Image: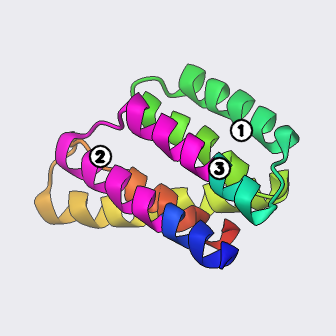
Amino acid sequence: MPDILIAAVYIYFGLTISFQDFNYHLIRNQSLMKFLVSSSATFIIAGRSVSFVVICFATLFAILLRLLFAENIGAGDLKLFIALSMWSSNVESWLSSFTISWILGGLVSAVVLLRKRQLKRRFAFAPFVFLGFLPAI
C-alpha cells in the first residue's frame, strides 16, 4: 500500500505541475509547497527516510545554475529540482535523475526548434524533470 501511495502522489503532482508549466510557463510556489507537504506526509506514512545531504546538495547546485544561467532556466524549474531532491536516496541518484531530465528536455526541445525554426521560444521543462526523476521513486 505505501508504494502505491507514493506513486500516486508523485504522478498526481507530476501531471498537475507539468500541465501548469506547459499551459502557463510557470510553476507556482503554492503547487511546489503542496507537493512538498504531500510528499513529506506520504514518506512519514510509508516509513521512508529523506536525505538532507541530497537536499542541501540540490539547493547549492540550483543556486549555482541560477547564477550561471539566470536567463536560460526558470526559477520554478530550479525549485522543482530542489523539491524532487527528497525523492532521491543519495547524491548520485539525484545527479543521474537531473542528467536524464536535461537529456530528455534537450532532445525534445531540439526537435521542436528544428521543426518550428524558432530560436527563442519558451519551453515547459517540468514534464521532463518529473520523467527524469521517475526512477528515483
Across and down, in percent, residue 105 comes to 42, 59
Mark 1 surroundings: few (<14), some (14-19) or many (≥20) residues within 10 A: many
Q: Residue drawn 25% across and 40% down?
A: 25
Could you tell me which secondary element the residue under label 2 belongs to? helix
Q: Is residue 70 left or right of residue 55?
A: left
- Residue bounds of the magenta highlight: 11-39
Q: Which mark is residue 58?
A: 1
Instruction: Give the class, few, some or many, for how many residues have Cα within 10 Å of label 2's Cα (few <14, many ≥20).
Output: many
Image side of residue 105 versus residue 23, left or right? right
The residue under the point 69% across, 47% down is 85
What amino acid type is highlighted by mark number 1? Ala
The three-letter code of the residue at mark 3 reads Ala
Sequence-earlier tag: 3 or 1: 3
Q: Position of residue 40 (x, y in %)?
A: 66, 47
- The numbered mark, 2 or 3, whose residue comes first in the sequence reads 2
Q: What is the secondary structure assignment of the residue under circle 1?
A: helix
- Identify the residue position indicated by label 3 in the image: 41
- Say if mark 3 contacts mark 1, CB within 8 Å: no
Mark 2–mark 1 Cα distance, whole angstroms, equals 21 Å
* Residue at the image position 42 percent from the left and 29 percent from the top: 29
Quarter occupied by residue 127: bottom left
The CA distance from mark 3 to mark 1 is 21 Å
Question: SS of the residue at dot 3?
Answer: helix
> Looking at the rendered structure, which numbered label has been put on residue 21?
2
Residue drawn at 79 percent across, 32 percent down: 56
In this rendering, position of residue 45 left or right of residue 27: right
Residue 6's x, y, as percent?
61, 67
- Assess whether residue 36 is covered by the magenta stretch: yes
| Residue 123 visible within the image | no
Asked if 52 appears above or below 44 in the picture, the reply is above
